[in-house]
Amino acid sequence: MDITRRTLTLGLGAMGVLAGCGNGIGSTGSNTIDARVDSTLSQMYTQFPGTVDLAQKASGLLVMPLVTEAGLGLGGAYGRGALRVGGSTVDYYSMVKGSGGLQIGAHQYAHVLFFMTQEALLNFRRSPGWAAGANIEYATPEQGETLAAETTTSMAPVIAVIFGQSGLRVGATLEGTKYTRIIP
């Protein structure tokens, strides 16, 4: 695909608008983020009971209650959430993602990163901007199925669960996504 200056400008502008929207969380503060994180975890535990055991084994959870992703040639995604350690919020994070290629549409989803080792959690927290990449194991449960954490999955340092998808865009991955600590 040949990217022109106009396409690049439109794509970056769309990403800016998407980031500015803040998914309805941005300006309302930490109490709203925490309430949405609680609701998201409750929904996940109800729909996928296997995640309860996974959460109990995890060193920490990064919960993104609402991620909005849109693209037309160039695309982007934005969301805000909280890092929970021992059941309590310790930090707030935003996530951004940029993409290019043959794509059209928009969708929203929730995702939870389970940090299965203390080392993975410490690397995440010490990083000024952590980028999701090949070290994430995806556990994408189908509607009505229970999530089974297999031996290989449970040995992964970071496990991502993506659920609650709605919209008209196919696929949701976290590779190329950058997480940054924020002050809501």
Image (tube, helix red, strand yellow):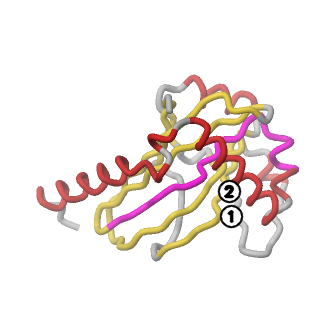
Q: Which mark is residue 161?
A: 2
Q: Residue at x 37, y 56 (%)?
A: 76
Left or right: 50 in relation to 164: right
Occupied quadrant, residue 86: top right
Q: Is residue 26 above or below residue 23?
A: above
Q: Which mark is residue 140?
A: 1
Mark 1 neighbour class, 10 Å CA radius: few under 14, some 14 to 19, many 20 or more: some
The range drawn in magenta is 53-71
- Is 51 or 17 nearer to us in this picture? 17
Three-letter residue code for mark 1: Thr
Q: Tell whether position 62 is magenta.
A: yes
Q: Is residue 102 above or below residue 42?
A: below
Residues marked 2 and 1 touching at CB (< 8 Å): yes
Occupied quadrant, residue 123: top right
Q: Residue at x 50, y 41 (%)?
A: 28
Q: Residue at x 66, y 46 (%)?
A: 35
Q: Tell whether position 70 is magenta.
A: yes
Q: Main secondary structure of the magenta part?
A: strand
